[in-house]
Image: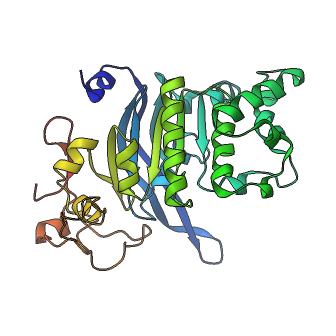
Amino acid sequence: MSKHDSKNDKEILLDVRHLKKYYPITGGIFGRTVGHVKAVDDISFTIRRGETFGLVGESGSGKSTTGKTILRLTPKTEGEIIYKGVDLDSLSKQELREYRPSMQFIFQNPYHSLNPRQRIGDAIGEALLDHGMATPAEIREKVLEVLSLCGLSSYHYDRFPHEFSGGQRQRIGIARAIILNPDFVIADEPVSALDVSIQAQIINLLSDLQEERGLTYLFISHDLSVVEHVSDRIGVMYLGSLVEMATRDELFAQPLHPYTKALLSAVPIPDPTLKRERIVLTGDIPSPADPPTGCKFHTRCPYVTPHCRMEVPAYRDVGGGHYVACHII
């Protein structure tokens, strides 16, 4: 049985249904709402227990907002977020707090989420105290254990954030996320600010932790070559919408949406004897405050038709769980 087959047999841990996140645009003397920035615009997907779902797209496509909205770090506008069979929006503040340890977030830049005056051991251990998952006497032992798991040493416990490299800080961010023993982790561009050699170390660490602890990941990145290494399935976002979703192998072997093809054409091939024809997209991503009519990608698509400019394409399964939103497919 293949890796994908075994994971397809597992229960759905997260079910995102028609998720929207709009930010109001205000104007005039009275500050009335005159429009909306449609950061996330009606997306749906599921993540099964133990798998890694990659969410990829250019900067401004709505990937990070999706992650933060799922964990209710920012409130949604519409839609349902079903986690372990429970609609998170139906929970009270106290009930949601009880779910918090199970759902954790790894930030792109962990330095910004660390208190520069707080020792690393305290920063990692404070969540255990906050959730009543350990006594003060137990904290140090648990923090040292997770530091070791994340490739750090015991002497790092008493150091401050500025004493660490970028890669070490990301390991600290991972340690803060996993010390609560979560089931589900959202990793938001966790390696984008790191050197390539350090990227590989962090990706391997995340993979090892998934294997050891049975973690489920939503892995957010703009880099398809990174997403390829870590993901079981991949969703491609453009201007707040999912335009394609498939298993990793299917997406890389048979991309269907013109935007996915363009992204893949920019991924380097390790074999110097092989060449891939680069598809260069013209223009910039339109503003999410004023998205194009019809297909949002039509302003940059090399295959655009009049139909594309007028009607929004249906997001549909074209076979085997391969979803695409395109009129020409």
Q: Is residue 134 above or below residue 232?
A: above
In the figure, residue 112 lies in which quadrant? bottom right
**In which image quadrant can residue 140 be found?**
top right
**Residue drawn at the location 13% of the way across and 70% of the way down:** 303
Is 212 left or right of 302, judged from the image as shown? right
How many callouts does the rendering have?
Answer: 0
Percent across and percent down for residue 82 are 46, 29
Image quadrant occupied by the N terminus: top left
How far across and down, in percent of the image, does residue 188 sit?
53, 50
Query: Does residue 81 lie above or below 213 as drawn?
Result: below
- Residue 191: give x, y in percent of width and height: 53, 54
Residue toward you, 271 or 194:
271
- The answer to whether residue 247 is visible is no
Above/below status of 245 relative to 295: above
- Residue 38 percent location from the top left of the image: 44, 60
State the quadrant of the C terminus.
bottom left
In this rendered view, identify the residue nearer to me: 140 or 22.
Answer: 140
Q: Is residue 156 visible?
A: yes
Q: Residue at x 35, y 41 (%)?
A: 44
Please name the residue shown 63% across and 41% down the image.
174
Task: Identify the residue at horizontal 58%, vertical 46% (top origin).
Answer: 75
Question: In the drawing, does residue 44 fall left or right of residue 159?
Answer: left
Colouring rule applied to residues: rainbow
In the figure, 314 relative to 130: above or below?
Answer: below
Query: Is 233 on the left or on the right of 26, as rendered?
Result: left
Q: Nearer the viewer, residue 240 or 199?
A: 199
